[in-house]
Image: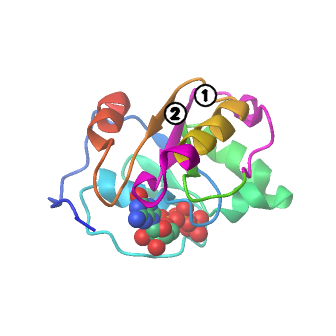
Amino acid sequence: MRRARLRPRPPDPHMRRLLMVGSVGCGKTTLMQRLHGQEIRYAKTETITAEDEVVDTPGEYLELPFYKHALRLASFDRELVVMLASATAAESRYPPGFATFFTVPVLGVVTQIDRAGPDAVEAAEAHLRLAGATEVLRVSAVTGEGMAELEARLA
Ligand SMILES: Nc1nc2c(ncn2[C@@H]2O[C@H](COP(=O)(O)OP(=O)(O)OP(=O)(O)O)[C@@H](O)[C@H]2O)c(=O)[nH]1
Ligand SMILES: [Mg+2]
C-alpha cells in the first residue's frame, strides 16, 4: 500500500475545535494523527484525550451506554463533532438520529476507504446519514485520499 509522505505541522489555529466520535478501531486516532501531520502509529485511546484542537475519545464511549453521557459533556466546548464510521465495519454502532444528541454541528466521515470496496463505503455513509449526519466525507488516513477535502471543511 502506498503511504503518503507526512510533514509534522504546528497546531493549526484555523482548524475548528473537534470532537472525534466513533466505534473501537474505526480510525479516530489515526485520522487525528494525519490531521496533525504526525507519523501514523497505533495507540489505543484509553480515555478522553485533547491534542491541540482535537479531542479524541475511546470507541467504548460510543459502544457502551454507560459512557455516552461523557461524549455529550466533551462536546460542549467543541465547534464540530466528527462522527466516524469505518468502511470496513459490517454494521453501524450509531442509534438512528444519534447526531441530535449533540448541541453542536456534526460532520460524518467514512474512514479506511482504502480497505474497502465502493459498496462498503456507500454502506458506511448510509449508516452515518441514518445517524443524522447531513454531510459525509470519505477519507483514508493512510493513503491521504479525501484528506484535502476534509482539511478544507475543517478550516
Ligand atoms: N488502511 C487503513 N488503516 C487505518 C485507517 N485508519 C485507521 N486504520 C487502522 O485501524 C486501526 C485502528 O485505528 P485507530 O485510529 O487506533 O482507531 P480508533 O478509532 O482510534 O480506536 P479506539 O482508540 O480503540 O477507539 C489501526 O491499526 C490503524 O492503523 C485508514 O484510513 N486506512
Ligand atoms: Mg483511538
Q: Amino acid at mark 1?
A: Val
Q: Assess whether residue 104 is covered by the magenta stretch.
A: yes
| Residue 115: quadrant of the picture | bottom left
**Residue 114 appears in the figure:** yes
Write the residue at 60% across / 28% down: 104
Q: Which mark is first along the chain, 2 or 1?
A: 2
Q: How far across and down, in percent of the image, does residue 23 sit?
A: 65, 58
Q: What residue range appears in magenta?
A: 92-120
Q: Assess whether residue 40 is covered by the magenta stretch.
A: no
Q: How is the image coloured?
A: rainbow
Vertical position of residue 55 compared to residue 150: above or below: below
Q: Amino acid at mark 2?
A: Leu
Write the residue at 62% across / 53% down: 22
Residue tagged by mark 1? 104
Q: How far across and down, in percent of the image, does residue 34 sit?
A: 31, 56
Q: How far across and down, in percent of the image, does residue 6 sit?
A: 18, 60
Q: Residues within 10 Å of mark 2 (few under 14, many from 20)?
A: many
Q: Are marks 1 and 2 in contact (CB under 8 Å)?
A: yes
Residue tagged by mark 2? 80
**What is the C-alpha distance between the residues marked 1 and 2?**
6 Å
Q: Determine if the C-beta at disc 2 is less than 8 A from ligand 1.
A: no
